[in-house]
Amino acid sequence: MKKLILILIVVIFSAGLFYSCNEAPANTDAVRMKLEDIEIDPGFTWFSLTYNDYIVEADVMTQIRNKYDPQAHKIIVFAKPSCSCEGDHKYFPRFMKILDSAGIDENHYEIYSTREITNKHPYMSVYKLNHLPEFVVMKNGLPVYSILDSLNYYAAQGINYPKYLEEFLFEAMKK
């Protein structure tokens, strides 16, 4: 009986996992999405939980608001649909919460869902993706700061500052 229950649990879990993954044929182009699309897309079922759990650094939010120039800055977000929020994927919902908390209007950032760094995207002529997710701050139409490239650089160097994604966004706004 216990064996039957265990098998049933595994089957139900597996069915849920397969249902939550987007098994559509791979598209070679990044797809622009709105935040409300992300929240209901099967490839981002984990998004809301991580978004809601993340607590932003209020002091840094004030600094970002003061430095952010909607006439000059635009933020480009590339995210990969997946079955879980493991590894770097957790940065995507956290970053979106930072943008919302900083009061950055959805008209001043673009979100692209892409499966691979080699997929075509509208900014290929000025920016090459190195990993997913990726958050690029543009100023006057040109990329000036890659938040996760910077985060990875600091981590590789064993440097503890900045500690939060918010601090990286603030650094980008100073460029």
Image (cartoon, rainbow, N blue to C red):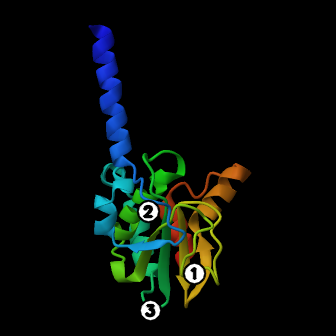
Q: Which residue is mark 3?
A: 71
Which is closer to the viewer, label 2 or label 1? 1
Q: CA distance from mark 2 to mark 1?
A: 20 Å
Q: CA distance from mark 3 to mark 2?
A: 21 Å
Q: Are marks 3 and 1 in contact (CB under 8 Å)?
A: no
Residue 13 pos. (x, y %) = 33, 32
If you read the primary sequence from the N terminus, does the residue marked by circle 3 or circle 2 appear first?
3
For this rendering, which residue is in front, 146 or 161? 146
Q: Are marks 2 and 1 in contact (CB under 8 Å)?
A: no
Quadrant of residue 39 in the image?
A: bottom left
Residue 83 visible in this rendered orientation of the protein: yes
SS under mark 3: loop
**In the image: residue 25, left or right of residue 2:** right
Q: Which residue is mark 2?
A: 95
Whether 3 is drawn above or below 47: the answer is above
Residue 123's disc is 1
**In the image: residue 61, left or right of residue 30:** left
Residue 143 pos. (x, y %) = 60, 80
Residue 48 pos. (x, y %) = 31, 54
Residue 105 visible in this rendered orientation of the protein: no
Q: CA distance from mark 3 to mark 1?
A: 19 Å
SS under mark 2: helix
Quadrant of residue 93 in the image?
A: bottom left
Which is closer to the viewer, label 3 or label 1? 1
If you read the primary sequence from the N terminus, does the residue marked by circle 3 or circle 1 appear first?
3
Residue type at mark 2 is: Phe
Q: Quadrant of the N terminus?
A: top left
Residue type at mark 1 is: Tyr
Residue 32 pos. (x, y %) = 42, 75
Quadrant of residue 102 in the image?
A: bottom left
